[in-house]
Image (cartoon, rainbow, N blue to C red):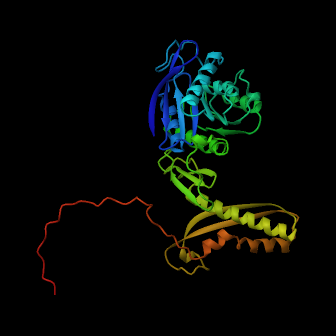
Amino acid sequence: MHTEKLHFAGSGATELAGRLDLPEGTPRAFALFAHCFTSSADEPAAARISEVLTEHGIAVLRFDSIGLGGSGEDCADTSLGSEVTDSDVTDLVHAAGHLRAHHAAPSILIGHSRGGAAVLAASEHLPETRAVITIGAPAGTERTHRLDTALLVMHSPTDDTVGIDHARQIFDAARHPKSFLSLDGADHLLTRPSDASFVASMLATWASRYLDENTPAQVRTAPASAEGVVEVSGNGATRFGQRITLGRHLITADEPAPVGDDTGPSPYDLLLASLGACTSMTLRMYADRKQWPLENVTVSLRHSRIHAADCADCETRTGRLDKLERVIHLAGDLDEQQRQRLLEIADRCPVHRTLHSEIVVDTALAAGDHAEPETRDAPTATPGPAPA
């Protein structure tokens, strides 16, 4: 990531100061971030969220509100309790115009605290918007019911600055598609780095589904990974956080606490999810072919490590083994014979067969990723016995 400092005209005769955080390579999309209106664009939470978004290929323009950071005027009247003003909206529209003129119009609008109310009000003036995200935003007179784009409401139930009821009002007023994510344990300003990282990771993952088909061609990066190819790389959100690209789909993985920050499923969670999804799909296809009254399949799975000596049916007799427990619930008016047959079919799902077959993992360095030769001082020779 690299950052460009910039200035552009705001409402009236004011000049606004901003930071444009750019990813390596061509941005996948541009986002406009209206940070918390009681702090500057250099606040740790805003900086952290922006940094993680660039790891997802999203460029972010975050700017100081009037009277804050590098921007002019007095901020005395920008308290959380005051209404979003026409000037607030105009500043956002001007910031978007700067992006449109010099790069590409923002397709993502992000607002923290009162900034969330501002992006809700400004979205109707920015037709390129595809996704709007609010973080701890107060509900007000912004025309949420007229929002014509996807909405993600993020709010902490323990926010003692802007109560959780504000999130309910915003969510209820908006039309679908809309989502809500609880920031349990976080404070209003996201002062804990782990909370800011979690917000950034979840925000980027959610927004990505609204980008590929709608993002202008000039700001797209390389196409999604080929069918059947999965690409995984560190997402910068947490120490172990991973960005997983599966074709046109994007998910996040992490290690559970206390090793990681639990911002996504663990590698073994993903393994279990793969087996569970394959099991459910296989049973659905079989029941449909047989025209059996199977209404739904629920698969519960658990991974553990056991002593080989405790497994009577295992070939390995020493050391420890991986054990996957799978419990299948079949909903529907099925007789006992049908249920037993579906239980047998579960073992025929492709992922189950793969786990039980011989697997070859061929690992190699990517082209160009070769270690530099290591230079060391030659060791001092020690006399020893002559070879026989």
Q: Looking at the picture, how far across and down is residue 77, in whole percent?
A: 58, 13
Q: Looking at the picture, how far across and down is residue 323, in whole percent?
A: 59, 69
Vertical order, 140 against 182 (above or below): above
- The answer, for residue 82, to whether it is visible in the render is no
Please give left or right for residue 355 compared with residue 388 in the image.
Answer: right
Vertical order, 297 against 237 (above or below): below
- The answer, for residue 320, to whether it is visible in the render is yes
Q: Looking at the picture, how far across and down is residue 86, in whole percent?
A: 65, 16
Q: State the quadrant of the N terminus.
A: top left
**Nearer the observer, 327 or 254:** 254
In this view, the residue farthest toward the left is 383
Report which quarter residue 324 is drawn in: bottom right
Q: Residue at image x 69%, y 38%?
A: 180
Please give left or right for residue 2 compared with residue 330 in the image.
Answer: left
Q: State the quadrant of the C terminus.
A: bottom left
In this view, the residue farthest toward the bottom is 388
Report which quarter residue 365 is drawn in: bottom left
Q: Looking at the picture, how far across and down is residue 197, in whole percent?
A: 52, 40
Report which quarter residue 147 is drawn in: top right
Please give left or right for residue 121 compared with residue 9 in the image.
Answer: right
* Count of marks overlaid on the render: 0
Vertical order, 313 against 145 (above or below): below
